[in-house]
Image: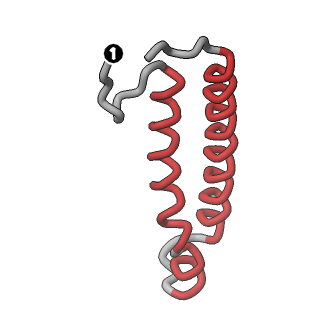
């Protein structure tokens, strides 16, 4: 029997998943306020909002790729013995 601390990634793909997930949070949070920041407060240009959306899409795409890779590796790995 082995015990692993749940927050440590077991491989590079796991670390990528954690990193991209954290990055996505930092992109999604200002996106919630992007309309206000661009149109009402006028503290950032409209291009910023578009760049933020594009960054979010890119991060989501990479997250999906890493999740799919981890899912496939999990299906192809031998079952652990109890």
Q: Residue at x 46, y 37 (%)?
A: 19
Q: Residue at x 68, y 53 (%)?
A: 54
Q: Tell me if 26 is positioned left or right of 57 in this view.
A: left
Depicted 19 relative to depicted 22: above or below? above
List x then y, in percent, for residue 81.
Answer: 48, 13
Q: 38 or 19: which is nearer to us?
A: 19
Q: Residue at x 64, y 57 (%)?
A: 51
List x then y, in percent, for residue 42.
Answer: 52, 81
Q: Quadrant of residue 74?
A: top right
List x then y, in percent, for residue 60.
Answer: 64, 47
Say which quadrant the N terminus sits in: top left
Coloration of the structure image: secondary structure
Q: Quadrant of residue 35?
A: bottom right
Depicted 61 relative to depicted 70: above or below? below
Q: 15 or 41: which is nearer to us?
A: 15
Mark 1 sits on what residue? 1
Count of numbered marks: 1
Depicted 55 relative to depicted 36: above or below? above
Q: Tell me if 47 is positioned left or right of 19 in this view.
A: right
Q: Tell me if 29 is positioned left or right of 53 in this view.
A: left
Other residues around mark 1 within 10 Å, as few (<14) / some (14–19) / many (≥20): few
Q: Secondary structure at mark 1?
A: loop
């Amino acid at each position: 029997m082995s015990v692993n601390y749940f927050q440590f990634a077991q491989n590079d793909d796991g670390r990528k998943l954690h990193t991209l997930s954290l990055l996505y949070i930092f992109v999604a949070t200002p996106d919630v306020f992007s309309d206000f920041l661009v149109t009402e407060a006028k503290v950032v240009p409209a291009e910023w909002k578009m760049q933020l959306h594009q960054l979010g899409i890119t991060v989501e795409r990479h997250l999906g790729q890493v999740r799919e890779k981890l899912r496939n590796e999990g299906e192809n790995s031998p079952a652990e013995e109890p």
